[in-house]
Image: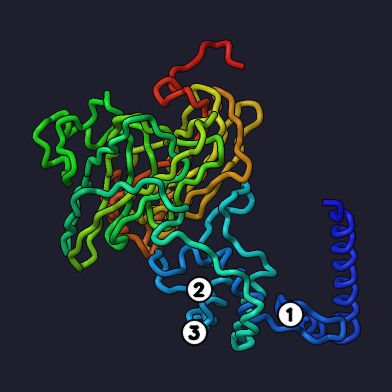
C-alpha cells in the first residue's frame, strides 16, 4: 500500500504520454494513431504493436469472465478452457464481445453498480478482437496463468450437503406440463444456516424455472401431499392442497432460471432452515420435441459461524393485467412499502417471452423516483443483479417494480401478437415478478418482519 501514490502518479504520467503521442500522430501522420494504439496489447514507443496472445492475454480474460459457463458440464454449448477449444471460436468471440452479447449482462449502466457484473472493459474487448484479427496466436504456454479451480458439477465450493429429488420427473415430447412438485425432507436434527446454495437440474433443456421453498415442520402447506414423489396440483385429492399448490407464504431458499447464479452470501449473512424442515421443489418444465427426464438437486454450504443477519427473499408481483394485442411497450407496475428496516442486497426480475424491460425504483414523495436497476430483459438469460454496496432502507420505504412488454410482431420471440396476454404459468402466457433479497437481524423471521412497527419508526 505504500506504493499507491507512486503507482497512481505513474499511471497518470503514462496516460498523458500516450495522449500526447496520439495527438502528435493524428496531427503529423493521418492513420498512424490507429496503427500505434490498436490491439489492446502493450505498445512500444518505437511503434511496434505487441500482438495479444492466448496464454498471456486472452486466457486470463476467459477465466475471469467466461469459464463459469464455458466449461465441461455447464450451460454454454462449448468449452473455452484450452487453446485448442478456443481457437476455432476466435472470430465468433470477437463478434460477440464487440456487440456486448457476451458475457451476458442486461443492466442499464446508468443505474447502479453490481458486484456480479461480468462485463468486459473497452480495453479487454479490444484485446480479444485484436487477438482474433491476428489469427489467434497461442504464444508461450509458460506465460499462462494457473488453471482456474472449479468444483466439479457446481459453481459454489463443494457443498456440505446435496439434496436431490428422490424420483425423476418424466417430461413428455410435446404439450404443456403442469407445475410439478416434489417434497424432499432435509432430515435436519438442528437448525441450519445456509450461506451458499445452488440449484442444478439434471437436464437443463427442460427446465423453464425452479423454485425451492423451505417448509418448516409446523407449516400446514401441502400437508396432505405425498413426500418424495412428483405431483401436480391436479393430482392432489385434498381441495385445500390443490389451492395451496399455487400460492404459499413459505420462505424461499432459491430461484433457478436459465443464466441465473447461485446464492453466495458474505460472512455474517445466511438463509435459515429450521430443524425438521422439508424443501419443496417447484419445477416448471417445458417440452422440446424430445421426451426425457429430470432429477434436480440443490447443493447447500453451511455458515461456519452463526450469522448476525438473516437473508430473506421477497417479491413485488402483479398478476392482474391484460396486455393488448400488438402492444409494443405495455407497462405494468406494482409497489409496496417495507414494514421494517432492511438492507437491500440484490434483484431478480422474472417475465416470459414478451418481457422487454424491468426496473426497480424507490419512490420518495419529497425526492422523486430513484431508479435502482433497469434491465433490458432477455428471457433466455434471466440474471440476478447483486448490489456492489448493499443499501440500507428504512421502514416504510416505498419500492416499486415496473415491467414493459412487447406483444407486437416486432418481438421475434412472441408466440402470437394477435392475442391478448394474461398472467399464466406457461411461457406463451406472462408473469410479472420482481424478486429481491434483503438482510435483517438474524433473530427476525419472515413473519415477524412483516409485523409493522408503530408510528414511531426511526
| Residue 118 at x, y percent in the picture | 57, 59
Of tags 3 and 1, the one toward the viewer is 3
The kind of secondary structure element at disc 1 is loop
Q: CA distance from mark 1 to mark 2?
A: 26 Å
Decide which of tag 3 and tag 1 comes sooner along the chain.
Answer: 1
Q: CA distance from mark 3 to mark 2?
A: 12 Å
Q: Circle 3 is placed at which residue position?
A: 88
The picture quadrant where one finds residue 423 is: top left
| Residue 372 at x, y percent in the picture | 58, 42
How busy is the neighbourhood of tag 3: few (under 14 within 10 Å), some, or many (20 plus)?
Answer: few
Residue at 43% from the left image edge and 25% from the top image edge: 445
Quadrant of the image for the C terminus? top right
The kind of secondary structure element at disc 2 is loop
Is residue 399 something one can see in this rendering? no
Foreground pick, 165 / 23? 165
| Residue 1 at x, y percent in the picture | 82, 51
Residue at 66% from the left image edge and 64% from the top image edge: 121
Foreground pick, 409 / 277? 277
Q: Say which mark, if any, is on residue 38.
A: 1
The picture quadrant where one finds residue 120 is: bottom right
Of tags 3 and 2, the one toward the viewer is 2
Q: CA distance from mark 3 to mark 1?
A: 23 Å
Q: Circle 2 is placed at which residue position?
A: 81
Amino acid at each position: 500500500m505504500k506504493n499507491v501514490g507512486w503507482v497512481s502518479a505513474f499511471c497518470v504520467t503514462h496516460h498523458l504520454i500516450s495522449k500526447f503521442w496520439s495527438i502528435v500522430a493524428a496531427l503529423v501522420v493521418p492513420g498512424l494513431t490507429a496503427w500505434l494504439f490498436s490491439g489492446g496489447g502493450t505498445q512500444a514507443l518505437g511503434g511496434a504493436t505487441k500482438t495479444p496472445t492466448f496464454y498471456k492475454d486472452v486466457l486470463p480474460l476467459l477465466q475471469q469472465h467466461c469459464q463459469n459457463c464455458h466449461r465441461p458440464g455447464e450451460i454454454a454449448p462449448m468449452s473455452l478452457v484450452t487453446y485448442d477449444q478456443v481457437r476455432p471460436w476466435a472470430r465468433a468471440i470477437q463478434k460477440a464481445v464487440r456487440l456486448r452479447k457476451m458475457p451476458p449482462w442486461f443492466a442499464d449502466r446508468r443505474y447502479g453498480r453490481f458486484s456480479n457484473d461480468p462485463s468486459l472493459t473497452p480495453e479487454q474487448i479490444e484485446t480479444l478482437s485484436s487477438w482474433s484479427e491476428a489469427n489467434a496466436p497461442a504464444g508461450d504456454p509458460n506465460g499462462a496463468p494457473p488453471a482456474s479451480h472449479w468444483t466439479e458439477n457446481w459453481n459454489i465450493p463443494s457443498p456440505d450437503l446435496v439434496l436431490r429429488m428422490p424420483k425423476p420427473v418424466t417430461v413428455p415430447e410435446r404439450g404443456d406440463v403442469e407445475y410439478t412438485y416434489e417434497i424432499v425432507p432435509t432430515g435436519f436434527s438442528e437448525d441450519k444456516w445456509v450461506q451458499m446454495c445452488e440449484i442444478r437440474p439434471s437436464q437443463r433443456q427442460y427446465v423453464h424455472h425452479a423454485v425451492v421453498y423451505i417448509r418448516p415442520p409446523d407449516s400446514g402447506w401441502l400437508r396432505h401431499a405425498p413426500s418424495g414423489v412428483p405431483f401436480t396440483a391436479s393430482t392432489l385429492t385434498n381441495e385445500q392442497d390443490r389451492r395451496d399448490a399455487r400460492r404459499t407464504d413459505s420462505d424461499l431458499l432459491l430461484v433457478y432460471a436459465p443464466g441465473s447464479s447461485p446464492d453466495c452470501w458474505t460472512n455474517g449473512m445466511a438463509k435459515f432452515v429450521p430443524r425438521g424442515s422439508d424443501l419443496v421443489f417447484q419445477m416448471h418444465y417445458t417440452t422440446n420435441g424430445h421426451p426425457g427426464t429430470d432429477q434436480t438437486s440443490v447443493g447447500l454450504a453451511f455458515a461456519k459461524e452463526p450469522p448476525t443477519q438473516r437473508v430473506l427473499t421477497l417479491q413485488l408481483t402483479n398478476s392482474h393485467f391484460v396486455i393488448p394485442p400488438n402492444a409494443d411497450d405495455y407497462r405494468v407496475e406494482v409497489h409496496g412499502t417495507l414494514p421494517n428496516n432492511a438492507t437491500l442486497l440484490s434483484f431478480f426480475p422474472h417475465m416470459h417471452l414478451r418481457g422487454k424491460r424491468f426496473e426497480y425504483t424507490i419512490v420518495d414523495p419529497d425526492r422523486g423516483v430513484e431508479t435502482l436497476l433497469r434491465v433490458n430483459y432477455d428471457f433466455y438469460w434471466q440474471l440476478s443483479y447483486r448490489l456492489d454496496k448493499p443499501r440500507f432502507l428504512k421502514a416504510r420505504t416505498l419500492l416499486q417494480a415496473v415491467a414493459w412488454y412487447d406483444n407486437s410482431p416486432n418481438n421475434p420471440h412472441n408466440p402470437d401478437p394477435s392475442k391478448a396476454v394474461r398472467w399464466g404459468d406457461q411461457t406463451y402466457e406472462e408473469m410479472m415478478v420482481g424478486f429481491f433479497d434483503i438482510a435483517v437481524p438474524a433473530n427476525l423471521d419472515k413473519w415477524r418482519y412483516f409485523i409493522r412497527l408503530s408510528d414511531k419508526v426511526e
